[in-house]
Image (tube, grey):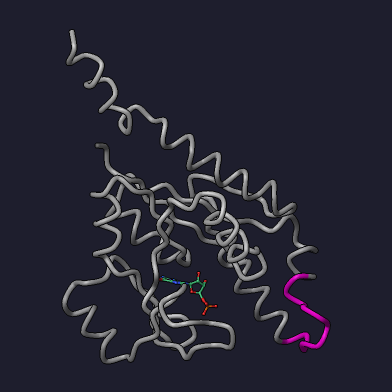
Amino acid sequence: MNKGGVFIISGPSGSGKDTLIVRLLEKLPELRFSISSITRGMREGENQGEKYNFITREKFEDMINNGELLEYNTYVGNYYGTPKAPVVKAIEDGCDMIIEVDVNGAAQIREKLTDAVSIFIMPPSYEELKARLSGRGTETEELIDRRMNSALGEIRRASEYDYIVVNDDIDTAVNDIMSVILSQRLKTERKSYIIEEVLKKC
Ligand code: 5GP
């Protein structure tokens, strides 16, 4: 059996990456999803262990000190990190894993897992990003500007990624991500078992 692949997905707030990932996991249910450990409080609609494991700062710092994290970063005063063990297990089990992280986390993973494939989810235009971040028009200009600046900061680092998926039409964007994953599965290094299987009979 060949090893599984790691797919990093990042994108700014307003790129729609969370919705895309939900749809992707419905279409390719064999994909594993990396559940991040984080120290921020749970928001309405979130459940423990679904997308995140909500843990204390003390527990998070223990995980750092014990080398249990593949990467971690702080965001608005809270820790966010990817536990290493489930990723290593997915690779060993021959399963593909999706890891959703910010641009800093993505850079840390690329350094450790050089075969990881990274995908950046891009809004279709500046205007559309602004419209999405403005929400229902109830936010102040200052808040919208802060969100825009943070999103633009991430977009400035999009060229670090292997693939850019533009999220204009959601079905097209999901299909684009699937194309990346499915083509990766056809790579020669992931098919070496079939070459060996056929040749061993001769
Ligand atoms: P939120 O608090 O809105 O759910 O997420 C805030 C940011 O943290 C998003 O940009 C998200 O991609 C990022 N993030 C989520 N999980 C992780 C993680 O495990 N590691 C890192 N570095 N960033 C994460």
Q: Quadrant of the N terminus?
A: top left
Residue extending farthest right:
137
Q: How many marks?
A: 0
Is 65 located above or below residue 117 in the figure? below
Is 30 located above or below residue 134 in the figure? above
As rendered, which of 128 and 185 lies closer to the eye?
185
Q: Name the side, left or right, on which 66 lies relative to 8.
A: left
As rendered, which of 77 and 93 lies closer to the eye?
93
Q: Name the side, left or right, on which 137 lies relative to 52.
A: right
Q: Which residues are magenta?
A: 132-142
Quarter of the figure with residue 33: bottom left
As rendered, which of 159 and 110 lies closer to the eye?
110
As rendered, which of 143 and 138 lies closer to the eye?
138
Q: Name the side, left or right, on which 176 lies relative to 100.
A: right
Q: Position of residue 121 (x, y in %)?
A: 59, 56
Residue drawn at point x = 58 percent, y = 66 percent: 18
Residue drawn at point x = 56 percent, y = 50 percent: 27
Q: Is residue 187 magenta?
A: no
Is 134 located above or below residue 15 in the figure? below
Q: Quadrant of the C terminus?
A: top left
Residue drawn at point x = 51 percent, y = 49 percent: 28
Residue drawn at point x = 80 percent, y = 63 percent: 127
Q: Is residue 141 magenta?
A: yes
Is 54 located above or below residue 109 in the figure? below
Quarter of the figure with residue 141: bottom right
Q: Position of residue 26 (x, y in %)?
A: 56, 56
Q: Position of residue 54 (x, y in %)?
A: 40, 85
Q: Position of residue 178 (x, y in %)?
A: 55, 44
